[in-house]
Image (cartoon, rainbow, N blue to C red):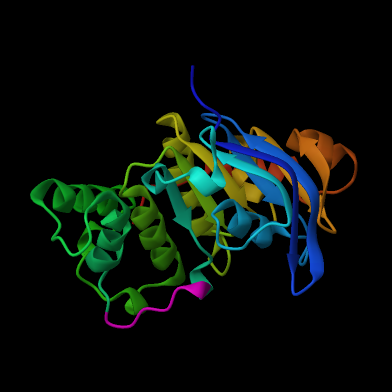
Amino acid sequence: MPVTPVTITNLGVSLGGVPILRDVSLTVEPHEVVALLGGNGSGKTTLIRALLGLVPHDHGEIALFGTSLDQFHQWSQIGYVPQRASVSMHSTTVRELVSSGTLSTRRPFTRLGRAGRDRVSEVIERVGLAKKADDAFVHLSGGQQQRVLIARALVSSPELLVMDEPFAGVDLATQQRLADLVGSLRGDGMAVLVVLHETDVFAPLLDRVVVLREGRVAHDGALEAHIDHGHETQPPTRTVRIIEEVRPWK
């Protein structure tokens, strides 16, 4: 029986003595796409960082694939796509950056083997950037940079993809293409936890939304129920129309 990728129970996190998350509980089941919603300062990014062990938690429990966070070592099972603004690269090429995603799957200071190089080329092609593989990351558009970060997260063949605001600073056409890619990953059986400001193009892919407000879970369930309570301003008809217009990678 598949193991639940994420189980968070009564999680509390404080930063600088200020409570950020208060008794947050949520799960992400196999093959689910779950969106984490909430206003600025609601605790979304802090929750992601706590989940990945990047910030300590005061109380509560985090389990990844059935293993307590402090005992979890199989990080190749998790692909992480940070906010693009937090990634600063200069002369690093697309291929080099994507290759860095293999570090959790090989011994330190060893060169990438043939199979690894083939996998890097495979995921670069999957995100539609084969012709940009040797270009510098900083010379790419915002949407292309986001696709590179997704490729880096995918190179270890994870079972869970965690994305922190993948649509930040990219145009609507790029959002459509990113949503199409995530849809194909879901079709492959991957679980996805994604931080969003607006559901828009992601709406048809979402199994559940978890809404944070002032560090607490205000809603955990269907997006439609969240909209019905007046917390979503984008009309679903627009969302459906956008998805129908998804175009191939360029």
Left or right of 233 on screen, residue 152: left
Q: Residue reaching furthest front?
A: 71
**Magenta region, residue range:** 86-91
In the rendering, at what x and y percent does residue 185 appear? 43, 38
Report which quarter residue 17 is drawn in. bottom right
Q: Is residue 24 magenta?
A: no
Q: Indicate left or right for 152 with 170 as reference.
A: left
Q: Position of residue 46 (x, y in %)?
A: 67, 61
Where on the picture, by quarter, is residue 97?
A: bottom left
Q: Position of residue 87 (x, y in %)?
A: 45, 73
Examine the rendered structure and indicate whether residue 135 appears above or below residue 73. Answer: below
14 to the left or right of 170: right
Figure quadrant of residue 32: top right
Q: Residue 21 at x, y = what percent?
A: 77, 57
Q: Is residue 233 visible?
A: no
**Closer to the camera in the image, 209 or 238:** 209
Determine the main secondary structure of the stretch shown in magenta.
loop
Q: Residue at x 39, y 43 (%)?
A: 74
In the displayed orientation, state which residue is furthest to the right. Answer: 229
Residue nearest the viewer, comparing 45 with 50 = 50
- Residue for point 23% across, 61% down: 108
Q: Is residue 52 above or below residue 205?
A: below
Residue at the extreme left of the image, as rendered: 114
Q: Residue at x 22, y 47 (%)?
A: 122
User: What residue sits 39% from the left and 53% below the top?
Assistant: 153
Q: Residue furthest top?
A: 1
Query: Does residue 104 lie above or below 65 as drawn?
Result: below
